[in-house]
Amino acid sequence: MFRIKKTRKPPRPPETFAYGRVSTKDQNADRQLVAFEPFGIDERNIYIDKKSGKDFDRPRYKALVRKLRAGDLLILKSIDRLGRDYVEIIEQWRYLTKDKGVDIKVIDFPLLDTTYCKGLLGTFISDLVLQVLSFAAQLERENILQRQAEGIAVAKANGVVFGRSPVTVPSNFDEICREWRNGGLTAKQAASLCGFSRKTLYNLTVEMRKVEG
């Protein structure tokens, strides 16, 4: 009796992927998608999350990691699109590049490109730049939270009325305001995302600018 020998399916050739992130469902990732266009990435290989960057508990990111194989290339617009927690950014970067053997290219910072130099020098440069940028990403998030708290305190001291019930300012308030100022959201959409009126949105942003100087 002859046994039919099963042949293993050959591994797929390396592919290029892209990952983008915005903080809320009503924000769009158009600028990130435009930045990905020169790389000719298959639409099926572009993963976008609409969640905060405070941790990596994001469905599309998890799906991307499951798909990535050794030799693949991952494109990011900027390091803060990957995340905003210093320790977790470092851990994820090392997991992807060292454990999974994936290359990463950060568009906004060419030195963060593991395809550029594969030797010890390349690893040293990437690790050094990564630590600086991931620290900056977390520092920005902490500054956002601090500005929010200070701005709310000043607004209350100046008699800004928040309504009958206490106003809860979302953790991504600063990002929503930035998107609003850049034209990605209307004032009505920005206020709705924050859960309060346009008047409160205007009052809070004015008071926060006073705090920031």
Image (cartoon, grey):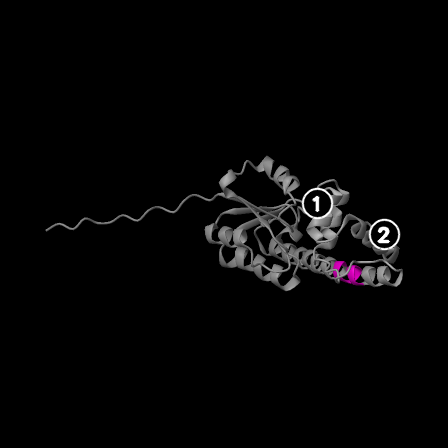
Q: In the rendered image, which quarter contains the C terminus?
A: bottom right
> Which of the two residues, 100 or 29, is positioned nearer the viewer here?
29
Q: Would you say residue 133 is visible in this rendering?
A: yes
Mark 1: secondary structure: helix
Mark 1 Cα shell of 10 Å, populated few (<14), some (14-19), many (≥20): some
* Residue 202 belongs to magenta span: no
- What is the CA distance from the residue labelled 2 to the residue labelled 1? 18 Å
Q: Quadrant of residue 165?
A: bottom right
Could you tell me residue 119's position as x and y percent? 57, 53
- Contact, mark 2 vs mark 1 (Cβ under 8 Å): no
Mark 2: secondary structure: helix
Give the mark nearer the N terminus: 2 vs 1. Answer: 1
Could you tell me residue 22's position as x and y percent? 64, 48
> Which of the two residues, 185 or 135, is positioned nearer the viewer here?
185
> Which of the two residues, 158 or 87, is positioned nearer the viewer here?
158
Q: Quadrant of residue 171?
A: bottom right
Residue labelled with disc 2 = 206
Q: Would you say residue 69 is visible in this rendering?
A: no
Task: Say which mark, if any, is on residue 189.
Answer: 1
Mark 2 Cα shell of 10 Å, populated few (<14), some (14-19), many (≥20): few
